[in-house]
Image (tube, coloured by chain):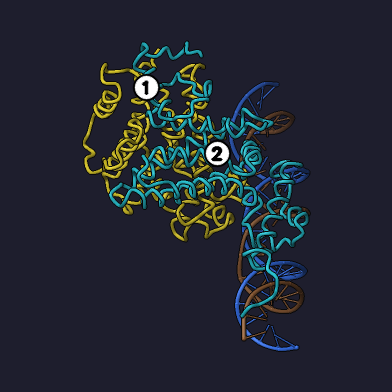
Chain colours: A cyan, B yellow, C blue, D brown
Amino acid sequence: MLSTTENAGPLGRREQNKVDTRRAITDAAFDLARSVGPGAFTVDQIAARAGVSRRTFFNYFHSAEDALTVRTDGFLELALAVFGQLPQDEPLFDSIVRAFSETTRMEGLSQHGELFRMADSNPDLLRAQLHSWERAEALIVEALRRRLGPAASTLYLTALVGCVLSCTKAAMRDWAASTPESGDDSGTQLEARILASLTMLRNGFADPTTDPIADPTTDSTADIAADTTATAQGTSPVPSVTAGP
Amino acid sequence: MLSTTENAGPLGRREQNKVDTRRAITDAAFDLARSVGPGAFTVDQIAARAGVSRRTFFNYFHSAEDALTVRTDGFLELALAVFGQLPQDEPLFDSIVRAFSETTRMEGLSQHGELFRMADSNPDLLRAQLHSWERAEALIVEALRRRLGPAASTLYLTALVGCVLSCTKAAMRDWAASTPESGDDSGTQLEARILASLTMLRNGFADPTTDPIADPTTDSTADIAADTTATAQGTSPVPSVTAGP
DNA sequence: GGCAAAGTTGCACACCGTGCAAACAACGGG
DNA sequence: CCCGTTGTTTGCACGGTGTGCAACTTTGCC
């Protein structure tokens, strides 16, 4: 029963080979997309660069664009995993905010932003990414349903999750657009935007003039929320046109 | 030759022919999707049924699925058109609610719901629909920017529009799932869900236990909103949403 | 070693999406 | 009415896509 054949880690050779192949394909796809541009290369080229046959590529991915959504999938799976580990008695919105804030610590964040930017010029890649978000939405709805119990209406759940993801998406878009070349602090830049957009959501988008990015140093989301509300009630009703920091 | 619409309107023969051809293609695509199922037919079949050549099909649409997003596009364009015609001094959220409520009066609403349901079993169709929503989002952001002026931050705009569309999408999903065979009142059923989800959004999704579908008779969403806002601020009726110039 | 399960590869085939040029139909002036 | 212009349709060709199938190779296990 005790086989002395050395296994590198908990994964068997088969599992490890699959992981490696998958990784080789996604890396090859990303390198090609970066060098010649998204949509400007063929599946054959990806397969050749990854060192596998064309047929094998299609054993792993449905299309060339799907091989580029791995980072997006990872981003969203990470958020889901973090959310699942948070205490159940924590206020719901706090859990959500923390889960998505944590995603800014993921590996390959800059690549993720780069792919976000690529989608602007490539409809097929955009569709693949949208599909990735959509799949994540279904998973998160399931997780939320387990947490909130069967009493919560489906409409409430799907609308909430859709809004949370829309806010995160908007934050990522803004972040990707504003940091073409990401520095070391790009993670915190993204986190600030996620925090800001989710705070807007929590406030029901009451105040259009708030530009929370201008002051991303606040570490407590409750402070931001209270602050925004206070601003809305304290100052006179909203000079929307003349709002300046 | 294609259609019996002898409309000698402002359209010349060329324009009219194009409209007819486009219509013939979309109708053929929808009929096929309904009869044999989405994704179970080829472009050649669509072209044959529409009475045009395969090449002509591709002069109008990029793919078979794109020919099925016309209703989705129409739905969102209608919302945008309604929104553009509303008075600028109306509270923003009220305009949004009204714009999307109006869409329930569109023609071919039941077909729209049917296509929504088809997307569940067809990834490519789902992607095409998601892309349609995405395109609409960009247009609505533009319209909102014109209304709110350049002071509103891009993050605020994109997050808000994304959330509004997510809520509408959730409403449509719930509606499409709950009314497999649509009756005459399906429009009001959908409208109630849109109202409910957008009210949730306005309240920042504060109360997970609310099941607004159970009581869709609420005619004044402002009541709910004012209630929540008053709770948060404690005093004045607060035009926080009303960023009117 | 040797067998069975799992994974890879080449091949064939239908389908997709597009550039191109010829054919065709709608305008509009003479 | 004829004819040139312009815009649309169509057939054709060609490379790329996605998948079923039948070898073939690798891995796991006795």
Is disc 2 on the same chain as disc 1?
no
Task: Specify the amino acid type for callout 2.
Answer: Lys
Q: Is residue B83 left or right of residue A5?
A: left
Residue B192 in sight in this render: yes
Residue B60 in sight in this render: no
Determine the residue positioned at 33% across, 48% down.
A148
The correct choice, above or below, for B190 with respect to A60 in the image is above
Q: Position of residue D25 (x, y in %)?
A: 76, 74
Q: Chain of mark 2?
A: B
Q: Position of residue A67 (x, y in %)?
A: 64, 52
Query: How many residues crowd mark 2 within 10 Å: few (<14), some (14–19), many (20+)?
Result: few
Task: Specify the amino acid type for callout 1.
Answer: Thr
Q: Position of residue B163 (x, y in %)?
A: 43, 34
Determine the residue positioned at 40% across, 50% down.
B114
- The residue closer to the viewer here, D26 or C27, is D26
Q: Position of residue A208 (x, y in %)?
A: 43, 21
Q: In which quadrant will I find the C terminus of chain B? A: top left
Q: Is residue A6 left or right of residue A215?
A: right
The correct choice, above or below, for B34 with respect to B11 in the image is below
Q: Chain of mark 1?
A: A
The correct choice, above or below, for A19 with respect to A210 in the image is below
Circle 1: element type: helix
Determine the residue positioned at 47% across, 61% down.
B36
Q: Is residue B201 left or right of residue A55?
A: left
Q: CA distance from mark 1 to mark 2?
A: 53 Å
Q: Quadrant of residue B238?
A: top left
- The residue that mark 1 highlights is A229
- The residue that mark 2 highlights is B18
